[in-house]
Image (cartoon, rainbow, N blue to C red):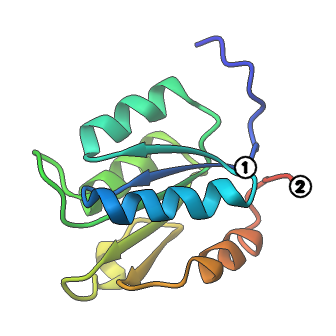
Amino acid sequence: MGQSTPIGEKTVLVVEDEALLRFDIVDFFAERGWRVFEAGNAEEAIALLYRHGEIRVVLTDVQMPGGMDGLKLAHYVCDRFPPTLLFVVSGEGPVMREALPARATFLPKPFDLNRVLRQIDGSGIAIPRT
């Protein structure tokens, strides 16, 4: 793929169909020095993951338009892009732990993005500090 960005860069993919919420999350990470990619559905997210192999964190909503919801996307990412750290969020109710892929965390909406950063820091994923 010819990526010049090193693996482990502070890079996150935000997958959220609600544009205003997605913009807020993108701004939060960007203001803290992260390189942020964004997608409005799972198909866009998968295309970005294949183009940007340096992505190590994915935050995805469960309810999204299209043929794949965020839970199915999380399993797809876990299977094809290890060791990506996954955050699965929903405002519709909790997702059972057994339904989540390995290394995934469920967060009910609204959630605390500072908590997400603390979990990333404690995850063991090789992400350089700024």
Position of residue 41 relative to residue 3, above or below, is: below
Q: Quadrant of the C terminus?
A: bottom right
Question: Residue 7, relative to residue 30: is it above or below?
Answer: above
Tag 2–tag 1 contact (CB < 8 Å): yes
Task: Name the residue located 65 percent from the left edge and 53 percent from the top edge.
Answer: 30
Mark number, residue 10 = 1
Say which residue label 2 marks.
Answer: 130
Where residue 118 appears, as percent x and y from the top left, is 71, 78
Three-letter residue code for mark 1 = Lys
**Location of residue 7 by image quarter:** top right
Q: Secondary structure under badge 2?
A: loop
Secondary structure of the residue carrying numbered label 1? loop
- Does 70 appear above or below 109? above
The residue at 58%/13% (across/down) is 1
Picture coordinates of residue 122, whole percent (x, y): 75, 75
Up/down of 41 relative to 49, above or below:
below
Residue drawn at (12%, 52%), measured in percent from left and top? 65
